[in-house]
Amino acid sequence: MELKSYANADLKAFYDKCKAEYADYQSQGLKLDMSRGKPSPKQLDLSSGLFTCVSDADMKGEGGDYRNYGILDGIPEAKRLFAPMLGVEPDEVFLFGNASLQAMYFAVSNAFLHGILGSTPWCRLDKVKFLCPVPGYDRHFKITESFGVEMINIPTNEDGPDMDLVEQYVQNDPAVKGIWCVPQYANPSGVVYSDEVVTRFAKLKPAAPDFRIFWDNAYCIHHLVENPKVILPILAEAKKYGNENIVYEFASTAKVTHAGAGVSMLAASKENLDDLKRALTVFTISFDKVNQMRHVKFFDGKFENITAHMEKQREQLAPKFACVLDTLKKELAPLGIGQWTEPQGGYFVSFNAPAGTAKRIVQLCKEAGVVLTGAGAAFPYGKDPEDSNIRIAPSYPEVAELQQAMDLFVLCVKLAAAEQLLNA
């Protein structure tokens, strides 16, 4: 029976039972963290060979001596290795440092300081707007918030953002300069953009010539199923319509090898890359070419070896996602409390609690020893208009600890839902 159908006396008894169980959890002194999508130590161990796979001789590559200055855009061996990951050609790839967030921040800051392909720098404009599919990635929103950008929520459907709304904004409002996208296993919903959605992005005709799609393909090879859906390559699609300048595509090895020491990349048209390089030549002489070569040697320069490596990652992650989903189905589905995604890849499960209870659930979890990402984090300015969405990150704890955390989580959902119904 659904909880909302309980008679008042039964609801009170349910609440009292949950409260007693919650007090028991509080006495256990738990310290569990599901706040970020961090790889577990066992996942990181899969890439320990990075420490021993290179020698001095390997540093003398096609582009010269990689221990020295130069080669701003990255070594050719690494460009060839990573280009298939993004669905682009090697000469369309620029290799940054250890995190794609740096590349995204740079692209936004460059637009503000210098403009894009000769456009007016955004800092001189009265208004700059970005579209933000929600729920979305909190660190994306923090970047544009830090520049004072007006962020506009765009609902996300099962196949991607509401493209009717995206087209309405982009094609009619010249103040709209960009959109944040996570097209494969969106953070946190796990949504995979359909071919139609990708094509509609590629065909956009913006009112602003300096509009850019910030296409963060962070989870493009992070599959949880054997036969995953692969999205259309956005840059190749945009070329079909003479629109190749419309997109910046980002990715990294942060959750492929070592999270704090990966290689990040930006793929874009030659014109866009040349534009960004003009500012980057002032910013740095080169990024970490030694680390780029470490990755080349570790994977023997072959993309299929990256794919095989990600199968090992899947073996680590799939049981954790199963733990989360099985617990939600067993404990909450019969009560009709909440809705959640069942992603086929990526790092998160998006949970929608009864409206008005997300902050309470996160608070209850924290007070009993389980840390979650803050309620509302998946929305611009940290403001979820429904106070409903919670991002669950299963990757870091081992399954036994994760089960403890999930048992507490579903208990907190029950407790918050019962409180709300009793106070209605």
Image (tube, rainbow, N blue to C red):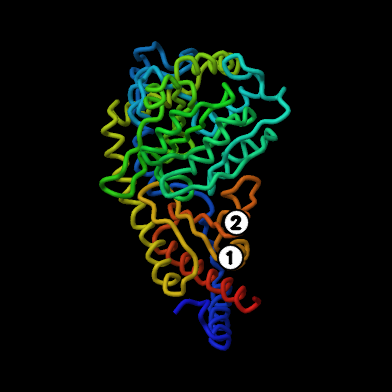
Contact (Cβ within 8 Å) of mark 1 with mark 2: yes
The N terminus lies in quadrant: bottom left
Q: Tell which of 72 and 90 is nearer to you.
A: 90
Residue position marked by numbered label 1 in the rendering: 361
**Dividing the picture into quarters, in which one does residue 243 lie?**
top left
Residue 250 location in percent, x, y?
A: 46, 31
In the drawing, what numbered circle is on residue 337?
Answer: none
Residue 360 location in percent, x, y?
A: 62, 65
Helix, strand or loop at label 2? It is loop
Residue position marked by numbered label 2 in the rendering: 375
Measured in 3D between alpha carbons, the distance from the residue under mark 1 to the one under mark 2, in whole angstroms, is 9 Å
Q: Amino acid at mark 1?
A: Ile
Q: Amino acid at mark 2?
A: Ala
89 vs 416, left or right, is left
Picture layout, residue 220 above or below residue 402: above
Residue 203 location in percent, x, y?
A: 44, 28
Picture layout, residue 220 above or below residue 394: above
Q: Tell which of 9 and 26 is nearer to you.
A: 9
Q: Tell which of 400 and 360 is nearer to you.
A: 360
Check the image and name the residue furthest to the bottom: 9
Count the labels in the image: 2
**For the point 45% across and 32% down, which residue is it?**
201
Residue 18 location in percent, x, y?
A: 54, 79
Q: Residues within 10 Å of mark 1 (few under 14, many from 20)?
A: many
Q: Residues within 10 Å of mark 2 (few under 14, many from 20)?
A: many
Q: Earlier in the sequence, mark 1 or mark 2?
A: 1
352 vs 64, left or right, is right
